[in-house]
Image: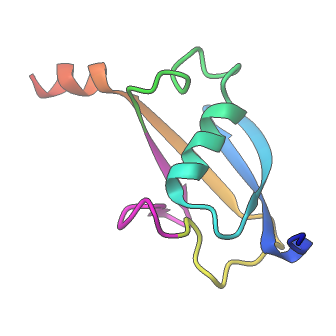
Amino acid sequence: MEESATSYLEIKLTFKGQSATVSIPKSTTAAALEEEVRHAFSEHSSGLLADPRTTIKLLYKGKVLGQNSSTDPAFPTDVKSKPVPKVVVMATSTEAVTTLNA
């Protein structure tokens, strides 16, 4: 059984001046979206997002996606596909955090 086109979202991701557009199911979890981000920017991020030790925050409308639970859908159920939702990607190396906290 195929899912209808309305059960998918096309979202625009931005990271350090780079942008990518991906199509994901509306039920995508924050953890799955994070993997999509790592894949979408794997060539452009100088290896930062490719490193599994990198902490990623995904911001949508000023709120961190998946902050409450990484198994819940990343987007609210009422999110609209037009205009295209924009997600800002922030990444921090765990080594940099350890250095700052030392």
Tell me if residue 17 can be seen: no
Residue found at x 61% / y 32%:
16
Residue at x 63% of width, y 54% of height: 87
The quarter of the picture where the C terminus appears is top left
* Residue 95 in view of the camera: yes
Which residue lies at the image location 55% right of the left edge and 23% below the top edge? Answer: 50
Q: Which quadrant would residue 84 be assigned to in this image?
A: bottom right
The answer to whether residue 86 is above or below residue 91 is below
Q: Nearer the viewer, residue 34 or 80?
A: 34
Q: Is residue 60 magenta?
A: yes
Q: Report whether 73 appears left or right of 71.
A: right
**Measured along the vertical axis of the image, is residue 75 above or below residue 91?**
below
x%, y% of residue 26? 70, 69
Q: Residue 24 in the image: state x and y as whole percent.
A: 75, 57
Q: Position of residue 99 (x, y in %)?
A: 19, 19
Residue occupying the far front of the picture: 1
**Residue 49 in the image, given as x and y percentages of width and height:** 54, 27
In the rendered image, the quadrant that contains the N terminus is: bottom right
- Per the image, is 75 magenta? no
**Magenta-tinted stretch:** 56-72
Q: Is residue 78 left or right of residue 94?
A: right
